[in-house]
Amino acid sequence: MTIKTYKGIIPDGDQIKLRLKTRTGSKGYRIVKFQGISNTPGTADSESTMMVWKEKQTSVSTSTATVDFSDQQLLGVLYYVDEASDTTGPVDTIIFDREIFNQDIYITHTATTGSTSMNFYLELEQVKLRDSENEYVTLKDLKQVMPQHGQNPPA
């Protein structure tokens, strides 16, 4: 089993792209760990939501802090709360899907209290896909994306 790790910092209202797709689509990935922490833990009240998406989000705002797991583009979410006056430390809730994907993914960050940047750590398990699995994963992703953009699938 091969694990790929990614880490970085995301300002409030921003998103980053993780390049995963290959020319042949023969490598798939699934999330095995998603963690985050404020870049200034314990110094100010903060409340943030980071999400992992299958496609780029057109805008990152308080509306993208709304968690809706019926959205097939959402792969994972991390909700983080830290209070400067709290002696127990920060609290987070992390939920992610074990779905296999083979395209680029995006991580968004929305702070609903404070404007703290968030550090993230993401572990992805790399999975070798056979040709039939590659086609299935790619077509499934395309099918999920097209209706969201108001397009009809090709006849």
Image (cartoon, grey):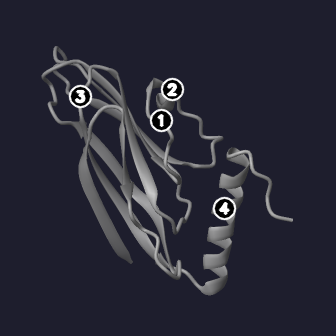
**Which of the numbered marks, if any, corresponds to residue 103?**
none
Q: Which residue is mark 1?
A: 59
Quick one: label 3, few (<14), some, or many (20+) residues within 10 Å?
A: many
Residue assigned mark 4: 142
Circle 1: is it few (<14), some (14-19), or many (20+) Cα within 10 Å?
A: few
49 over 101 or under it: above or below = above
Q: Earlier in the sequence, mark 2 or mark 3?
A: 2
Q: Residues within 10 Å of mark 2 (few under 14, many from 20)?
A: few
Cβ atoms at labels 2 and 1 below 8 Å apart: yes
Q: CA distance from mark 4 to mark 2?
A: 24 Å
Residue plotted at (30% across, 30% down): 91
In which quadrant will I find the N terminus?
A: bottom left
Q: For the residue marked with disc 3, what is the amino acid?
A: Thr
Q: Dot 4, how many residues are within 10 Å of its Cα: few (below 14), some (14-19), or many (20+)?
A: few
User: In the image, 22: left or right of 138?
Assistant: left
Residue 113 at what x, y percent from top left? Answer: 32, 18
In the picture of the structure, the residue carrying the numbered disc 2 is 63
Quick one: SS at disc 4?
helix
